[in-house]
């Protein structure tokens, strides 16, 4: 069974400023702000929602299909996907555009200044759900606005269950549009802040939305996650980790665990527990795709923590 990942592939350029921003920004001069930060520490990571989710599903032994649009600078990422045994069949290269990328500068207090260029991601609608065969489960995660609309609509029309994961794309949609995008979804996944945004925009509580679509999954960082399904709220605890290093990509790792369980018709609580394990493994490494547990190691942690089998 193919799990289709509609979303983004992106480069994350992360720079570290070895001082505090506040020492170099004059509060009374913000209206004429002109600052430069020397960043001796810089690294480039592979990321994007579809890329990160796919990476984690691969760790679990799945063979997901990524559907994304990228630019003329995609070659290094393509080589990486090939080395991981991941297909680029539904990854469309758009000449004249850059692959989506974020430029993140972090100071010693973990404050961040980020610039994000969507590039080819904005034209994600050029990919069509009909072009992907054998799909039995999908996720619609942040990409171009029109692409998210069309992919959700076409998955619903084809009767393919999908997870709607609006993430940072939430500001692009009105309340009515969000409700429409969720009509054919099996689940909505959001963090606790995004859950409040969805409620404010739609005028509906997540519990009510869950009754209509099947489930609403709310991640809460260090407080674990909550799954609203079947008229109940299931609280899934956070899993102990060897180190708290970098939360980047933890939500994507969580979603990979959720999708793995959904593909096997696991109960929501069991899927959530695997998702929590995946997030705890990721947070111990920098970047969204630098953790390298074996499938046996994931299975062992799941068994030791919850008594579940992978």
Image: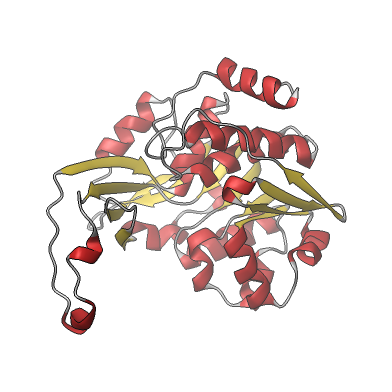
Residue in front for this viewpoint, 181 or 150: 181
The answer to which of 108 and 174 lies nearer the viewer is 108
- Who's the residue at 28% across and 43% down the image? 74
Q: Is residue 132 visible?
A: no
Give above or below for 249 relative to 156.
above
Q: On the rendered structure, is 114 left or right of 225?
A: left
* 286 up-or-down from 225: above or below: above
- As drawn, the residue found furthest toward the right would be 231
User: Could you tell me residue 52's position as x and y percent?
Assistant: 46, 40
Residue 15 x/y as whole percent: 23, 48
Q: Quadrant of the C terminus?
A: top right
Number of residue marks = 0
Location of residue 204 with respect to 161 vertically, above or below: below
For image coordinates 53% across by 61% down, the residue present is 148
Q: Which quadrant does the N terminus fall into?
A: top right
Please identify the quarter of the rendering in which residue 114 is found.
Answer: bottom left
Residue 226 appears anywhere in the view: yes
Query: x and y percent of residue 253 in the render?
Result: 53, 39
Q: Nearer the viewer, residue 295 or 108?
A: 108
Please name whichever residue, 27 or 272, is drawn nearer the observer in this view of the structure: 27
- Residue 215 position, x and y percent, is 76, 53
Q: Give left or right: position of 231 versus 87.
A: right
The structure residue drawn at horizontal position 74% and vertical position 50%, both measured from the top left corner, is 227
**286 left or right, relative to 206:** left
Colour mapping: secondary structure
């Amino acid at each position: 069974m193919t799990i289709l990942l509609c979303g983004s592939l992106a480069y994350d350029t992360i720079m570290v400023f070895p001082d505090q921003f506040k020492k170099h920004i004059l509060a009374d001069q913000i209206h004429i702000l002109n600052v430069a930060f020397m960043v001796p520490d810089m690294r480039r990571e592979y990321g994007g929602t579809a890329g990160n989710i796919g990476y984690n599903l691969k760790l679990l032994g799945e063979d997901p299909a990524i559907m994304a649009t990228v630019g003329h600078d995609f070659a290094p990422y393509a080589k990486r996907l090939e080395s991981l045994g991941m297909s680029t069949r539904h990854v469309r290269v758009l000449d004249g555009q850059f692959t989506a990328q974020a430029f993140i500068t972090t100071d010693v207090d973990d404050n961040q200044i980020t610039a994000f260029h969507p590039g080819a991601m904005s034209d994600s609608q050029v990919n069509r759900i009909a072009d992907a065969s054998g799909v039995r489960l999908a996720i619609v995660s942040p990409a171009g606005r029109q692409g998210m609309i069309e992919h959700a609509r076409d998955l619903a029309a084809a009767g393919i269950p999908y997870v709607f994961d609006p993430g940072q794309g939430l500001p692009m949609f009105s309340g009515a549009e969000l409700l429409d995008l969720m009509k054919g979804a099996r689940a909505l996944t959001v963090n606790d802040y995004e859950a409040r945004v969805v409620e404010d925009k739609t005028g509906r509580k997540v519990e009510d939305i869950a009754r209509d679509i099947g489930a609403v999954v709310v991640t809460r960082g260090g407080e674990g996650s909550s799954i609203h399904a079947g008229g109940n709220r299931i609280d899934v605890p956070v899993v102990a980790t060897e180190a708290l290093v970098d939360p980047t990509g933890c939500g994507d790792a969580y979603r990979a665990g959720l999708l793995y369980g959904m593909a096997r018709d696991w109960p929501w609580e069991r899927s959530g527990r695997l998702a929590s394990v995946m997030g705890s493994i990721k947070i111990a490494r920098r970047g969204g795709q630098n953790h390298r547990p074996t499938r046996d190691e994931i299975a062992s942690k799941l068994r030791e923590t919850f008594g579940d089998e992978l």
